Amino acid sequence: MDPGSVSRQLEHQPLDIVPQLWRSLANCVDAPSETDGQLATRLATQAGHLLLELRAMLFAEGASTWDVKDAGDAVAQRFLAEQFATHRPDDAVLSEEGREDPRRFGADRVWIVDPLDGTREFSEPGRIDWAVHIALWAGDRFGAAAVSLPSLERTFTTDDPTPCPRLTASDRRRSRTRRAVDHRRPR
């Protein structure tokens, strides 16, 4: 794959690179009774599925890690921005990857989004430690939130009454092992 070809394609039509999945997700319509928590959960989960499909496609095509990073950030951002514009048009959005929305300074409702947390990890084959984060600041507190871990097929949400899983001793050991080999830390 030509270096930069995915980035150039994204500048023009970012969502055309995964047309089948995009069409199925874009046609999802929220129910009139969909709560903010349900919306956050649905969008985080759908963005995660979109990212999984995109990642698999780009790896299969031999895309560079830079192209995988750029594509992941752009596609997730565009998907979420369009969904918020459709389903919560009066709300402001503060996104790590999006354009500045000055309405957020005076808005009562602000969605806070990281469309792809762990962009570097997303671009590395085999890595599962990346996520989609969506939260709503409503008035003077968080109104809803969801974190999707697509590679683990899990979404944590404020609407889910199920308690978070407890870490067992073996989970803690595995967690320490991952940190020990994290290449951001000195060896």
Image: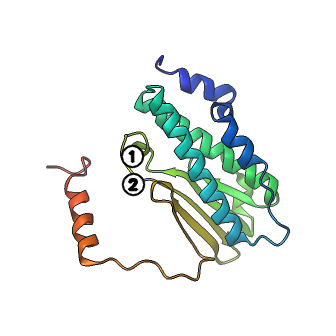
Q: Position of residue 71 (x, y in %)?
A: 55, 35
Which quadrant holds residue 157?
Answer: bottom right
| Residue at the extreme right of the image, as rendered | 32
Asked whether the viewer can see residue 165, the reply is: yes
Closer-to-camera residue (92/153): 153
**How would you rate the neighbour count of disc 1 (Cα within 10 Å): few for under 14, some for 14-19, many for 20 or more?**
some
Q: Position of residue 124 (x, y in %)?
A: 37, 40
Asked whether the viewer can see residue 98, the reply is: no
| Residue at the extreme left of the image, as rendered | 187
Which quadrant holds residue 161?
Answer: bottom right
Closer-to-camera residue (99/79): 79
Task: Tell me: residue 76, above or below residue 137.
Answer: above
Three-letter amino acid code at disc 1? Glu
The circle on residue 129 is: 2
Three-letter amino acid code at disc 2? Asp
Closer-to-camera residue (56/37): 56
Q: Position of residue 110 (x, y in %)?
A: 69, 64
Report whether 163 appears left or right of 89.
left
Tag 2 and tag 1, C-beta contact below 8 Å: yes
User: Looking at the image, is mark 2 or mark 1 earlier in the sequence?
Assistant: 1
The circle on residue 68 is: none
